[in-house]
Image: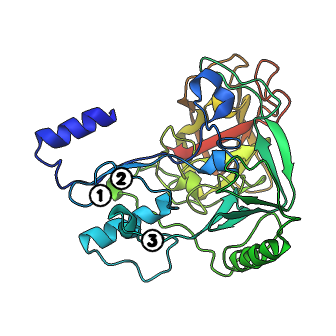
Amino acid sequence: WSVGEILGTLEELGLDHNTLVIYTSDNGPWLNFGNHAGSAYPLREGKGNAWEGGVRVPCIMSFPGTIPGHSVTDRMASTLDILPTIAAITGAPLPDKTIDGVNILPLLHNMEHANPRNEFIYYYEGGLCAVRRGDWKLVLPHSYRSYEGVEPGEDGMPGPYSHGKAGLELYNLREDIGESHDVAATYPEKVTELLAMADSVRAALGDRITGVRGSDNRSPGRIRMVEDSIRHIAKGKEYTIENPPSHRYPGGGPYSLTDGHLASLEFSDESWLGFHGDDLDVLLDLGTLTEIQSIEISFLSNQASWIFLPVEIEILAGDDLRHFNPVDRSDFGSDSADLKIDRHTYRFSGKLNARYLKIIARNKGKCPAWHPGNGENAWLFVDEIIIR
């Protein structure tokens, strides 16, 4: 829906005078999509890194009787702050566990000198890339995905990325919103102050870049509806994986491939396991000798995000771990360009008896020559293994 349609519906239902509407984004523009991307100007870079163009986004709110009309604030806020703010509005209690958001209701009231959030930390793929306090942002040494020096794609096809390397850099975002003038040498005391803040953050939340494991790391909470569960023979069965999935897409639990839940078409759905350049090589234990009539395995295709179907599927079966018999070996994905995001299911039908199944889905390996990621590792995303 467009914003106009949403506001119009609220008005039709008589809810427009007591509804908080928030219009924002989760990240900056995906610049290598060219004419499908938008712009982050005058910010530096875009989606997928810790420069301001990747994380700073517009936010428009409407809340009659609370937010004064046509008011503007340049104070810092985050989508992390939506939860505690709505809790404050509704009188709902916050959880006992520490959360990362703060109540920004004083900003919504446009209170003078209100500044509920004065600090922000910038993580990407588990790495601490920068910290901010007030107008000062300290960028920490790290490598990052960049859009500079490459031509973007167009009409839905992404262009290539380049790669950048940041050092220890200090920026005053009030004076230099584009992060173009490193002033670390001019303000060494500010660098020291923000380095201490970074050390404190690492100790609590960890940092993949420096190898620090945080003391306050915890798994995200998940809620799944029991009625959405799929019944099949392999549900709840244990398995081992030869090549572990990427830490970015490890699935929603230790046995995501047999938890009875199918993923959506969104690759960030935690039901998907993502393998970066590696094959899926899984050994499934059904617990006892079992009659099998069909095997189904789901894979995701999203070439614009470098996710390709496996080129080949191989199935082997055995009564014990010493002897496996071939069951099926077949080509699967093609080398052609297809930007449609879709689920593709491998299916085998045929009667067999086995306790163990060895399933191998061979990764494409590298993005093909026609793709903007030519020569870079391809992703393989796999979901539920369904045995009937």
Location of the N terminus (image quadrant): top left
Q: What's the mark number on residue 67?
A: 1
* Residue type beneath disc 2: Ser
Q: Residue 337 location, x and y as percent?
A: 68, 17
Q: Quadrant of residue 242?
A: bottom right
Residues marked 3 and 2 touching at CB (< 8 Å): no
Residue type, numbered disc 3: His
Q: Is residue 47 left or right of residue 22?
A: right
Above or below — where is 314 with respect to 203?
Answer: above
Q: In the shown orientation, is residue 19 left or right of residue 112?
A: left
Instruction: Establish if 372 lies above or below 106.
Output: above
Is the Cβ of the residue at disc 2 closer than 8 Å to that at disc 1? yes
Residue placed under numbered mark 3 in the picture: 113
Q: Residue at x 59, y 59 (%)?
A: 255
Relative placement, left or right, of 88 versus 268 is left
Vertical side of 62 occupied by 108: above or below: below
**How far, Cα to Cα, is label 1 from label 3?**
16 Å
Residue drawn where x is 61% and y is 63% of the image:
254
Q: Secondary structure at mark 3?
A: loop
Q: CA distance from mark 2 to mark 1?
A: 8 Å
Q: At 62% from the left edge and 68% from the top edge, which residue is drawn?
A: 134
The kind of residue on which mark 1 rests is Ile
Within 10 angstroms of label 1, few (less than 14), some, or many (20 or more) residues? some
Q: Along the line of sight, which residue is nearer the eye, 149 or 189? A: 189
Local crowd size for mark 3, using a 10 Å CA cut-off: few (<14), some (14–19), many (≥20): few
